[in-house]
Amino acid sequence: MRFLLPLFLVFSLFASAQSNYPQDYFSNPLEIPLVLSGTFAELRSNHFHSGLDIKTQQRTGLNVKAVASGFVSRIKVSHYGYGKALYITHPNGYTSVYAHLQKFALEIEAYVKKYQYEQESYEIELFPRADELQVEKDNLVAYSGNSGGSGGPHLHFEIRDKEERPMNPMLFGIDVKDTTVPVVKSLYVYPLDENAFINNSQSKQKLRLTALNNGDYVAESIQAIGKIGFGISTIDRQDLAANSNGVYNIQTFVNGSRNFELDFQCFSFDETKHINQLIDYEHFSKNKERLQKLFKKNNPLSILKSTINDGVLSIQDSTNSVYKIRVADYKNNESWVTIQIKGSKNSISQPEAPKTTPYFIKANETTNLKSGNVSVDFYKNTFYEDFYIDFEVKNDTLKLHDDVVATMKDFTISYDVSQYNSQDIEKLYIARLIGYRQYPSYTYTKKQGNILTASTKKLGTYALAMDTIKPAITASNFKDGQWLSKYRFLEVKIDDDESGISNYRATVNGKWILIEYDYKTKTLTHDFNDGIITDTQNNLKVIVTDNVGNNSTFEALFYRK
């Protein structure tokens, strides 16, 4: 049986939240029905998703329209992240964001290329004045694409408030068909201190779920004593797409009283890093499943709402409790999970001995660990909690725990490389060893004399690596000496298997040309429509440099009329 009073409150809060935002101000950014591949605040690696990912029918080049009148206030073009992104500020104080674009509309594209050629840089960030690039509602402003860190053609769309906080665009009346209830994938229960036991154990336990015909679930009952909490893996799906998306709201109730809520309406970019404390980070690292903790522990996230006892349950002997979880999407489709909890001292067993090491991290203190030629500096509040850390150095390999502890900020790894000759030092970098084969992955490395340093947020195994191999450069869609009069694009492939590409530069007849780098396809592309190449005989020169300074030069001759 569901709880009538909490449900009434849920619907009232839902209606109140919607009424606070203009419902008819913003229009659809595309000329097709909205189908989502990603929802707002969806759980992603190291961040919450800050907008809606709108499917573009597996195509690029769809018209992207201004959702309201305003002016282009920011343009950013980058190899990674949002790729080509456009920001439009509106008179009501909100800003709409359009990302992973293929290109901008004609006037905006010309504006951007002017500055790219002036600065001789593809990557650029511009802040036009309010009177420079004004747009009306439903004006064409760009074309959808797959640029930057996009995993496939789509439009990433955001609405931000005056404080630059991303808001759920669906709060503003942007509609997506959804009559499908969320799915609960798994449920876990956690003992939260040394005096807590669940079914005679001090380890977290996965609870068996039984799905009911109405979309709800019943979990197996538990015996417990002390302070416990729950974690849930759940997804939502819209009617027109099979994608596993994030949910909108999670609430928990103990014997009919609400004691915890996750509300995904809005967040700030400053706090998105705390997602790794919201999820069970160790579980994700080992199992690639994101369990959202339904209790608050050293986490400042604003999406944690009106919690009682921070969502922690204190189970007493000889008690019976009913714990319920309500999972809802934006359209208020909901799934409930019910767990019976029996408080019993019979669940107490021999406490498990905690794992210890010679090295203990206090989260609110600065710690330096040093062995041989390696030093690690953890600054105050790098971690959320105190813990024993594994630290061992063998030759040039640093074993720094496993990547199972969430961090709040970077820590620094330093190597003294004075034992190497100066020529070798120039080619050294600090690498994180990943995967079964311990493949060296480049970590941004600074050199100061004989000291190499790298800043990172990830624990794990690190080592010194050496890259002496130059990047590879090959022509992609032409041959040396070829006529390219009928070609729209000039394409060159580049690659570096070791430390990775750092930068590139292309010139024709000694003059810099704009050339776009797509790291996903390892392709450099020049658009002849830029009109910068006007000679018949043209000498192309491309220089590519990797992250330790190895560089390659490619030269070719081509002709155009």
Image: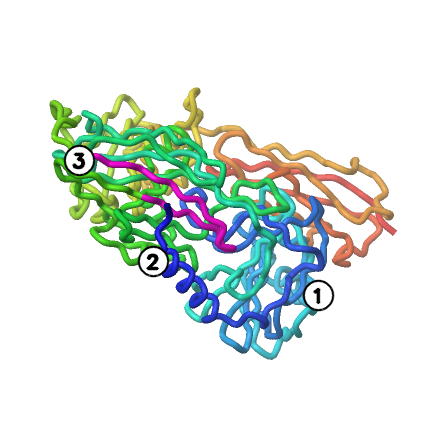
Residue stretch in magenta: 324-343
Residue type of the residue flagged with mark 3: Gly
Marks 1, 3: nearer the viewer: 3
Mark found first going from the N terminus, 1 or 3: 1
Which residue, given by chain and number where applicable, does mark 2 sit on? 5
SS of the residue under disc 2:
helix
From the viewer's perspective, tell me whether residue 108 is left or right of residue 38. Answer: right
Residue hosting label 3: 343
Tag 1–tag 3 contact (CB < 8 Å): no
Q: Which is nearer the N-term, disc 3 or disc 2?
A: 2
Q: Nearer the viewer, mark 3 or mark 2?
A: 2
* Secondary structure under the numbered disc 1 in the rendered image: strand
Q: Is residue 81 magenta?
A: no
Query: Percent x, y for residue 211?
Result: 45, 34
Apparent side of residue 57 relative to residue 180 in the rendered image (left or right): right
Identify residue type, mark 2: Leu
